[in-house]
Image (spheres, coloured by chain):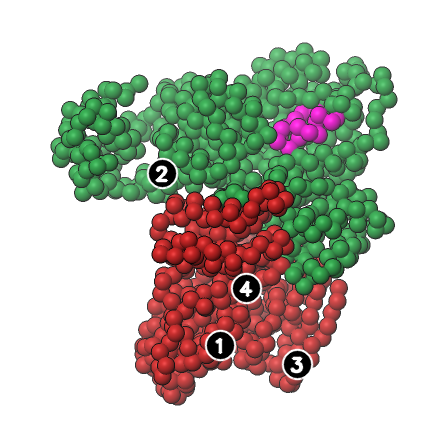
Chain colours: A red, B green
Amino acid sequence: MSEVIARAETGDVPDVRIERGERAVFCGLTSIIWLHRRIQDAFFLVVGSRTCAHLLQSAAGVMIFAEPRFATAILGERDLAGMADCHEELDRVVAELLARRPDIRRLFLVGSCPSEVIKLDLANAAARLQGVHDNRLRISAFSGSGIETTFTQGEDQCLASMVPDLPELAAGSQRLMVVGTLADIVEEQFRRHFAQLGIVDVDFFPAARADDLPPVGPGTRLLLAQPFVSDTVSALCKRGAKVIPSLYPLGVQGTLAWFQAAAAEWGKSADSVSEALAIPVARAQKALSRVRENLKDKTLHFLPDSQLEIPLARFLRDECGMSLLEVATPYLDQALMTPELVQLGSGVELVEGSDLDSALARVRASRPDLTVCGMGIANPLEAEGLRTKWSIELIFTPVQGFDQVADLAGLFARPLARERQLEIGSWS
Amino acid sequence: MELTLWTYEGPPHVGAIRVAASMRDVHLVLHAPQGDTYADLLFTMIEREGRRPPVTWTTFQARDLGGSTAEMVIETLQGVCERYQPKVLLVAESCTGELLQDQPGALAKGAGLSAPVIPIEMAAYTRKENWGASETLYQLVRGLLNGKARAAGEDGEAASADRRPSVNLIGPTKLGFRCRDDVTEVCRLLERMGVSVNVVAPLGATPHDLLRIPEADANVNLAPEVADLTCDWLRRQFKQPTIQTVPLGWGATRDFIVEVASVLNLDIDPDSIGESRLPWYSRSVDSTYLTGKRVFVFADGTHAIAAARMARDEMGFEVVGLGTYSRERARDVRALAAEYGLEALITDDYLAVERAVTELQPELVLGTQMERHIAKRLGIPCAVISTPAHVQDYPARYSPQMGFEGCNVIFDTWVHPLIMGLEEHLLTMFRDDFEFNDTAVPSHLGGEGAGAQQHDNVEEITTVADGAVAWAVSAEKELRKIPFFVRGKARRNTENFALEHGLSVIDVETLYEAKAHYSR
């Protein structure tokens, strides 16, 4: 299908080829799977169809044994035909839900493809419901629909919907806000590192508790933990915050650069950061060196999926010695990706968007040692004798920071190690 | 608008994919937004399929909604015909596609495609997965066979002397419960009866195979949820009788043999066809301990009905709850439940099922993946007997549910999570033993029974239960001597007994009074 070449403005970042066609990615609703684990007293109510409910449970699989903190209000024929007032119905469902779950401190109404096509105004509904349940909890709305969002973009929409609720940062003070979901263990590590650097005014957004809303204002400096938070960053910048451009905290190099970029805002030199963080850096490098042997000189193809492709490609090439055949990403936010693109440099085959069958044809032609792809495609490629890493695991597993560097590399090394170990005939 | 935490069935287009993915040379084009492609992983991850389901999605996004979505449908259809050259092209919409009213079926018919097109209306906002599979199979069979009605008078006479009688197996699909092995087992059973299997559909069939369906003498309806509509149409169109008995269980397998023989005019003694170890295993002394075990059954209609009969008549359990999420089978399940003195639970609300299990406190749950979650939380043993199922229910080994081998598999599957007689006896003997203490994880739960791992909290027991009844320290000590796997029930029964009798303190006497009161 249509194909455009977007020339890079400078010579030192890769050209981008744009592809249009069939996409094999999750929609933004999938973000709920990790967001509800992160924000421990939030509930996500999708207003959608049976497909939405089925997607969530298929993607979540058996990971959730407790009563999940997400649900779907399934639109029926009566809702669509206008026989039932959708807003009245929603009020009823929300009341039912809140009666069941008194522990919930924030409710997100999550828009879906059907709710958007019928133009159900969930922001309005959230405001109305906030009036009804004002003393109990906060209610806001965001879209996780597949027509508006791709996979991890659901988190961006969720966070952006919370920005208006953030308190104002006192004038004259400077605080750091780390934006994007991190595992609790990574947050703890990062807090310790920031303390080692003498930066104590740090907030993480989103926090583990819905009521822990970080303040924002002109003194806020944004440090991005995830590359898919474009709209959240725009909303925060409108409230005066400023972005600290940096690599993402993936790999030793990325994590060190990330802390150095933050520390520079607090007047600390890159060298002083390297010195303060020498121990975790050395530990990470040592752990990585063992895994690296499995990855060195192996070829790698990224199919577009999680939006982490570019920073991961940078890490796997620069720190693990892998060779990049193609790096495809569902969409490219140049502004948030510039430091990564500069680091990646020209000469990398970079694709934005997807035309699934032609992408698979390229994979079959080049037969990479490892293909990073969505879950639906992994086994069919394995059956063709190609090793894969399904990318949703990269979102669910703690991979950021020094002490996770070897784990991150291990996710890619394991399929290759397995191939070497098994003596059960040809893989394909 | 309906509040849903977990769903038993996916949307109808997932049923359409199940039929397409079961077949060869068929391709399905779905008009659906980006994100709906998650359905691929049901097949490639849960069932470990080595090929992508033969489905191509238009994956429209917001920017396409201004009017180009219809063009996307046509471009996609043309691309699919070129790339895959299907013998039949199915065209359908997901829920969001349906709202756009692009009518991809009509577009496909008018697009001059190289493959014959069968459009399928999915009714995404009223119907569900099994209905979608049923409708797709029906439209496919009807679309291919409609012009091929048998001439009047040619009424499917019983097999002539020089020809083996034959049947079709209708209904098994990908993502069905043990369909792969059930087909093998039923084929073996029929082979021993001297009956040929003409076509299995949709599992493994090509459109060309479907054209041969009328050649058989009868249709075996192996999955009524999926095949009722098709079997009924074949019966009317080609005067092919339908064999209705699903051979799930020892009795049902023998009934199946009798029905096949009767429909095909064969003189066959069921004893000569095969045997199962289930009757002997069930009679052997160790199984005495299974007597009256209280089981809760919840599944698709077919498996629920079969499991209830097996549970009561072949295992000697007491069925204390019976239900289904298949509304299409509600009448059958209600009728059977009434026969068992129960009121059927017909619902697709997971929470309603959970409430029922919590209230009934069965000793074994026979259910789906959802009931496995429920039972795990409540610390009750569970076996999965029906879809929806997870990856472990698509095992590598041969493990049919149907036929005589199916009986063997089911006996093991149901008994495994229970503590068997000899083991139970030992546990009672050694209940205060240093190894058999409360902190040891019960082996039968494989270390995953969270409920069983929750140790009694002495503080909790000695404080007031339900705000009305307190446990004396002596009674509480006695309670701890009761084996852990029945202690929860003993506690609840005793408290209920005390409440009913207006007692405010439970002592050792109360405990035994209650035991006597509730003993069967």
Quadrant for the N terminus of chain A in the image: bottom right
Q: For residue A129: magenta?
A: no
Residue labelled with disc 3: A8
- Residue at image location 59% in from the left, 45% down from the top: A79
- Residue at image location 42% in from the left, 18% down from the top: B283
Q: Reply above or below: B112 against B63.
A: above
Q: Which residues are magenta?
A: B219-234
Report helix, strand or loop for mark 4. helix
Chain to which mark 3 belongs:
A
Residue labelled with disc 2: B378
Give the image location of residue A301, x and y in percent: 62, 66
Q: Earlier in the sequence, mark 1 or mark 3?
A: 3
Dot in front, 4 or 1 = 1
- Residue at image location 75% in from the left, 34% down from the top: B141
- Residue at image location 66% in from the left, 75% down from the top: A16
Q: Amino acid at mark 2?
A: Leu
